[in-house]
Image (cartoon, grey):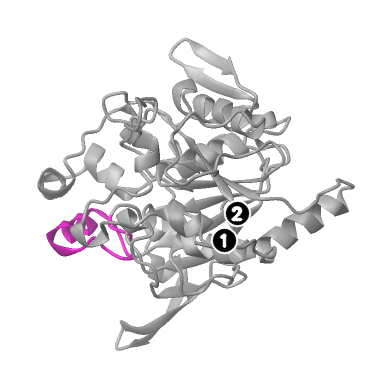
Amino acid sequence: METKTKKPGFLARLFFGSALAFGASQAAADNCYIMVHGHGTDGSFKSGTNQPALDYWSNYNFSEYAGNSAITELIAGSTDNYAIVGYNSTDEAGYQWWRDEAAGEIARQIIAIRQGNGDGYIHPEANTQCAANDTFWVVSHSQGATEMMYIAGNALAGSPNYNTAYTPSGGVSVNFDAAMSGLAGIFTLGGAIGGTEGADRVCNGNWLDSIINFAFLGQDCNASVEWLQTFDSYAAKSYIGSNLGAPIYVMGGYKGFPGLEGASSGLITGEDDGYINLASQMSCSGSGKRYVESDLNDYKKIFGISYGSPTYRCNDANKGTPRTYNMASVYTDHDAERNAAIKYPDYTNIEDGITCGNGRSMAGRINSCL
């Protein structure tokens, strides 16, 4: 099949323009998408073609999503490349997002990839390993977005945890600065930027929460889950500086899981993707578990009952983290976000948001925008 080279899209032109404004010389190059997976995967393990961190981007929980891949959507119709970052995010490991085994490991692998050392994975697609002269973008899902918020938020001098990850024995020096410097941008897909109310309910819920969790999630409150709660004492935004080492482009999902598994939304307030509150996924000020209706958008009402399509009010004046840009909320669930299984979902643009790639899956939007 013949491939073609895309002309730079909106975000790529924005990046090149910004680089030139700062006096940097930027020639058009292939994009390299550095993929950072979410919770529940032992990405530290790979043996031959047994590659959990790579498989994460096409694995599916629901049979109707079989055969789809976020990576395929990202590199479709271009000569772009990708790289896989793997870390251990399993419940058994229980590593909090600020741990050296999580944030530190991710940063070290990003540095190695950007140096042109490859990712060590066997790519099903030929000639898709990244080169040192590529333009680098990070694509993160779920907990991976929390990791990237912490890394980018501590990559500049003066940030509270500058170049530091942690072990039980204390701080460990990690060059977050080198990982983020010159990075074109970070995309978050259904990211737990503000945690998830599901973790709140698992760790501090009532008897009904326990029943729903037992029946549909099977989650326990280990250390990694504890640190995905929505309270400010756990949220990544409370542990970063006043600026980010790279811009972050945010997309949120608001479709519940198919079938009976959709009951997982009973653990979550307002709109959600079956696992994480939409409010938490978007870059907006306020609690990650607030009602989207009251804090992110306006509905028309009749006799106090909401109806009609919402108008989003999560604009640039109400961003919850610095140097972040809302793209859209997309009618897709947490599983489909990581495998692009719903290719042409509905969506809602956000005030002051970036509107390129309309009508595509989250991965497809990135492809269209670059």
Q: Position of residue 61 (x, y in %)?
A: 22, 51
Q: Which residue lies at the image location 54% right of the left edge and 70% below the top edge?
A: 357
Residue 259: x and y, percent? 15, 63
- Name the N-terminal-most of marks 1 and 2: 1
Residue 158: image location, x then y, percent = 72, 30
Instruction: State the count of labels.
Output: 2
Location of residue 82 (image quadrant): top right
**Which numbered disc covers residue 79?**
2
Q: State the SS at label 1.
A: loop
Q: Is residue 141 above or below residue 63?
A: above
| Secondary structure of residue under mark 2 | loop
Nearer the observer: mark 1 or 2; the answer is 1
Residue 117 visible, this angle: yes
- For this orientation, the residue located farthest to the front is 1
Q: Where in the figure is residue 105, as x and y percent of width and height?
A: 50, 25
Other residues around mark 2 within 10 Å, as few (<14) / some (14–19) / many (≥20): some
What's the magenta region?
255-274
Q: Residue at x 81, y 49 (%)?
A: 26
Look at the numbered discs 1 and 2 and tell me whether their residues touch, using CB distance below 8 Å. Answer: yes
> As drawn, which residue projects farthest toward the bottom?
302
Mark 1 Cα within 10 Å, few/some/many (few <14, many 20+)? few
Q: Is residue 220 left or right of residue 158?
A: left
Check the image and report above or below for 232 versus 319.
Answer: above
* Left/right of residue 306 with respect to residue 83 in the rendered view: left
Q: Which mark is residue 3?
A: 1
Q: Quadrant of the C terminus?
A: bottom right
Residue at left offset 72%, top offset 50%: 29
In the displayed structure image, the side of residue 199 where residue 170 appears, left or right: right
| Nearest to the observer: residue 209 or residue 152 | 152
